[in-house]
Image (spheres, helix red, strand yellow):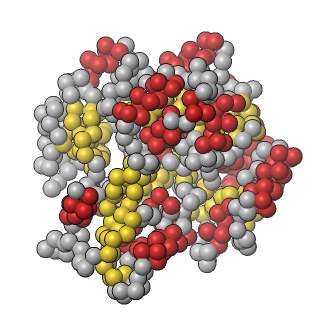
Amino acid sequence: MENQVNPTRNDNPVWLKTYEELGLTYDINMPPENSSLIDIFEKSFAEFSNRTAFICMGASISFQEVDEYSKQVAVYLQSLGLTKGDKVAVMMPNILQLPVTVIGVLRAGLTLVNVNPLYTTSELEHQLTDSDAKALIMVENFAKTYQDIGRDVVDNVVITGMGDMMGTLKGFMVNTVVRHVKKMVPDYNIGNSISFKNMLKKSPARKYKRPDDITLNDIAVLQYTGGTTGVAKGAMLTHKNLVANLVQSNTFLGSAFDEFDKRGEQPVIMTALPLYHIFSFTVCGMFGIYRGCIGLLVPNPRDLDSLMKAYEANPPSFFPAVNTLFNALAINEKFKAMDHSKLLVSMGGGMAVLSSTAEKWRQVTGNIILQGYGLSETSPVSTANPINSTTFTGTIGVPMPGTEIAIIDDEGNEVALGERGEIGVRGPQVMKGYWQRKEATAEVMTDDGYFLTGDIGIMDEDGYVTIVDRKKNMILVSGFNVYPTEVEEVMSGHPKIVECGVIGVDNGESGEVPKIFVVRQDESLTKEEVLKYSQDNLTGYKRPRYVEFIDELPKSNVGKILHKDLRDMEAKNNA
């Protein structure tokens, strides 16, 4: 089918009356075309210089320090001869160095490549190679992952310790514990590398030259995603895409932050979700800088004790999270007993928030979870529930300001309100396309600019959208997309596996987990061997949790694995 959508479908959008009733502005005012995220940063650094910008494990840095350090990162990258269009990969958990580095890359006029630090060697190699990254800035805990590639994929590597920006004494203690007590840093030897501290020492901020050729139309970030298929590819997010999403988010959330400004208080954003994930990157990291908030960084959200310790010491005002994290906290007795009076906004994204979780959270914190929806390709927020919602709606809300949502049938036509169709998004936050993948871009973009999400939804008469089905085969694990084809390709590399098929199965903790159906080459193959191979070759959330051996996989007449039949088989097994 050709991706064509009737451009007149939204001449009179039904959600406009909802905007009017809520007193919200639908149109957004964008800065001039010759501006960029750099202008956002510089304005915030000037306006909030004396405020705390980020806190991590009890250590903090101010906006003024982020300004200074990020200039130093930019100076170093510029000294390497990197110029506009060059890519710099950043591979870290939520530690103080991460926002400093990200902002430094962007201030240098370069393109950021966000990298999941839990990637396996093959996943990291693919992303670095595909993006043509010229430099990699990473935490030492995962340096061996890069070393194991066995060749210099990038020209320059910068390596930091977890505590490198936590002050002399605290930093030394944190690095000592991480390296020698918890033994979280495998031995590595990377020749073309420099330490983060040495990078800063040899790069004085006074030498920073702001690039004068970066505009809203330039690519700011390559955000890797499986998209609506399983091959990891970089969504090209421009400065305009990200600035637009900040402005849009402020329309919906700004009134809550205005209340803090009036009281002379500084809001705290709980940044437990990893900043390499687009939801946290924009809604926590970038939005926090934009509004002068404190970003409360949590390196490992699975460590609930550390998370709650940070929460108690710096009660957050804004808490974006996924269903699994909300639920884990809402049933925790220690969390229940904490003071939640500062918490004004809780936002759910990444995966569906269950109504049972939302109710538990409301009872504990008094907050209604505002569910939103977005993808890497939309920077990410496309729809959200308004901040003054009085109940958990179960919907993903209405289109963001300046955003159009179309519900589209298989022929590319708009369906009637209340009918099912694929959710299409058109707006200033929609990506430029996939990096070096014109065909993949053409498959998901209509002629008139709608991005086809692959998610099936319905829209009601007030413009609220409800997702009724997931992407055809995609598995959603704790807010992360897992694509069967990618897992199948990796697992088929096992010498005892003829072929395999992967589906998602329900799991109370994380929504879904992958299950693999295996046709054996060698009958001696055990489930333990399959799980061990996945452990060695796949990031944690992509690894199959269950293994079933079968004689043959269900296939179409052209040989494609029928994942629907595998899901039916699983349903019969559990009946």
Q: Closer to the camera, 22 or 12?
A: 22
Relative to 109, 420 lies left or right:
left
Q: Closer to the camera, 48 or 375?
A: 375
Percent position (x, y) of residue 421? 18, 42
Which quadrant of the rendered structure holds the N terminus?
A: bottom left
Quadrant in which residue 549 is drawn: bottom left
Is residue 37 in sight in this rendering?
yes
Percent position (x, y) of residue 483? 36, 60
Percent position (x, y) of residue 405? 27, 35
Percent position (x, y) of residue 114? 54, 53
Q: Which residue is rendered at x = 58% and y = 45% of the image?
A: 301
The residue most toward the right is: 169
Relative to 42, 283 lies left or right:
left
Is residue 214 in sight in this rendering?
no
Quadrant in which residue 288 is drawn: top right
Relative to 187, 86 lies left or right:
left
Q: Which residue is rendered at x = 53% and y = 22% of the image?
A: 344
Look at the picture and state if 260 lies above or below 158: above
Q: Which residue is rendered at x = 54% and y = 56% of the image?
A: 116
